[in-house]
Amino acid sequence: MTKNICIVAGARPNFIKVAPILHAINNARKEGRDICCNLVYTGREDDPTIEPSLFESLQMNRPDTYLGANDENLNELTGHVMAAFSAYLSAHKTDAVIVVDDLASTMASAIVTKKQGILLAHLVAGTRSFDINMPKEINRLVIDGLSDLLFTAGTGSNSAVTREGAEQSKVYMVGNILMDTLRLNHSRLRRPEVFDRLGLKAGEYIVFTLNRKVLIENKANLKDMLVAMNDNSAGHPIIAPLRPSAENVVKAIEKEFGLNMSALHIINPMQYLEFGYLAAHALGIVTDSGNVAEEATFNSVPCITLNSYTEHIETVKQGTNVLVGEDASRLSQQMQLMTAGRWKKGGIPDRWDGRSAERIVCILEETIDRNIRQKQGKDKQTI
């Protein structure tokens, strides 16, 4: 009997995490295993946040279904996704649904899945900020509470869900799925043209990314952070692939405060394979992105995270990551260590080996088979 799996993605970063699962399912089919998968995107087909090259870069097909949600209000978005995904599940035989991360659309899909009595798996379960005022924290708690299978990246996430009462039989530490994507695409990373344009050399530049609203909106503090980076770059260029919203704020700060950011080079956002190359060959990284920090640990690249917490504490305890919050003085101190080559030694956390997707597919197959056998047993008892 064919095992029908549905994977729900709600934003661009989700595709980077589900691509290895799609590859693992395709490999399982080639081995003769009776399994198939549909990819559902909660957004629109013409979503401007997804570059046309993304799916080609990840070697995956485009989503099979688009739910078309584009609401700015999170409550309206949740309702839109619930209605559309309910209709999808009613029309498609589905044995298991995988939801990814902690978006409002992820939570909406999880609720609908459980209401229809379908096996629910949460990819990257157990991530916590322990700040209940964050909408995403509420989403995480709801999704994990509903899920039948909790796929965690490490021991910290395991501890979070078990403390909250999750049954041990539901929790599987499969490792960090992002590492699968890095492993699969390592040989395909593309050297970006900015290397030639700016004369960059591997190990002699710093990468800077900026996305968090709390950083962008506090212009006075962001000014201090930018100055700290520039003044402590030790002559190394800082390459910043920024989206227009972040770029406009940074340039406005430079103009308003009369800054001379000689080390900072703002460039256009990069394609996945190009940014992967840029980050993997950097002297160090300054970022507010958890995903970028996780990849830095896998690549053994020093990383400073502009946040006071991380969903994956393994990047700090075992990896190359250091948290400085939004503190410019701490950023200065860590920049000095980075550029002086006095960074801490990092290692690869347990099961961050690029094999997470294979584990996930095997667990899904076993669980679906078990559910089918249990249902057949109940049917026989009824007869």
Image (tube, grey):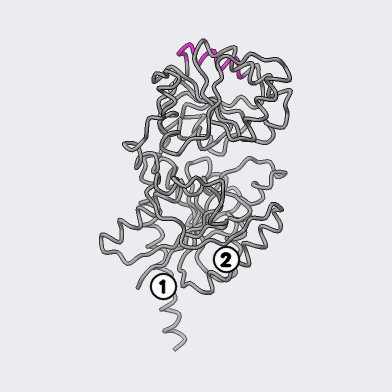
Q: Is residue 347 visible?
A: no
Residue at (56% x, 47% y) in the render: 48
Looking at the image, is mark 2 or mark 1 nearer the viewer?
Answer: 2
Could you say whether the residue bearing mark 1 is in a helix, strand or loop? Answer: helix
Identify the residue position indicated by label 2 in the image.
Answer: 85
Residue 99 in the image: state x and y as whole percent: 52, 56
Residue identifier under label 1: 372
Is 184 above or below relative to 142? above
> Is disc 2 in contact with disc 1, using a CB cutoff of under 8 Å?
no
Q: Which residues are magenta?
A: 331-342
Q: Main secondary structure of the magenta part?
A: helix
Q: Residue furthest left?
A: 31
Q: How many marks?
A: 2
Quarter of the image for the C terminus: give it: bottom left
The residue lying at 56 percent from left, 39 percent from top is 311
- N-term mark: 2 or 1: 2
Between the residue at mark 2 and the residue at mark 1, the CA separation in whole angstroms equals: 23 Å
Residue 350 belongs to the span the image colors magenta: no
Tell me where residue 83 sits by quadrant: bottom right
